[in-house]
Amino acid sequence: NLVLDTVDVTGNVAQVCDGGGLWAFETTLTLSDVLFQDNWVGNSGGAIGMEYCGGTLVDVDIRDNWAYDDGGGIAMHRSPPTLSRVTVTGNDASGMGTSGGGGISMCSCDPIISQTVIADNHSTIGGGVVCQTSNPLFEEVLIAGNTADEVGGGVYLYYLADATFENAAIIGNSAAFS
């Protein structure tokens, strides 16, 4: 298990693997009052990369991170975390031609995301969020001002993804192709 409480994770680089600020595999994350800023990764998860992980992220600020592949802010693979009061802003995942999820990328997972802002992120596809074979629940979420070079300025769902939005706003996002 990993517990981070009132911690700054800034200015880290992971050139070859996932998770510029934090890489977690087969563990439970408990993150509270954590700042992830200015982290860089050569693969997925500019701030956080997680695979086979559960846990909670509460009052976490994820901003200005970069990923060459997926998840400029967070890349979740086969992980069912709960995010509450998380801010995901100014992240980028656009190094590779098919990069997805400037803010959050998820593959084969069913996270619960509540009272969260996903704004001003950029990617090739899914500027705010990209979901592949995932079934996320978004409650009281704002997805705004995100951009994609191709499709899905705010949210891009593909390969059997099925998202549920309750009391959410998806506004002011843009993509080159619609």
Image: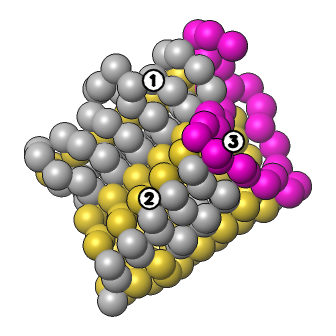
Specify the label residue 76 is tagged with: 2
Find the residue positioned furthest to the left.
Answer: 15
Indicate the quadrant where residue 175 lies: top right
Residue drawn at point x = 73 percent, y = 58 percent: 138
From what the image shows, is residue 107 above or below residue 64? below
Q: Nearer the viewer, mark 2 or mark 3?
A: 2
The numbered mark at residue 143 is 3
> Whole-Å distance between the Cαs marked 1 and 3?
17 Å
Q: Residues within 10 Å of mark 2 (few under 14, many from 20)?
A: many
Q: Position of residue 54 (x, y in %)?
A: 47, 78
Name which of mark 1 and mark 2 comes first in the sequence.
Answer: 2
Which range is magenta?
A: 153-178
Check disc 1 and report its element: helix, strand or loop.
loop
Count the labels in the image.
3
Q: Residue furthest right?
A: 167
User: Closest to the observer: 115 or 148?
Assistant: 148
User: Depth-wise, is mark 1 or mark 3 nearer the camera?
Assistant: 1
Q: Residue at x 58, y 10 (%)?
A: 176
In depth, the one of 99 and 107 nearer the eye is 107
Query: Quick one: SS at disc 2?
Result: strand
* Three-letter residue code for mark 1: Thr
Residue for badge 1: 124
- State the residue at coordinates (27%, 64%): 22
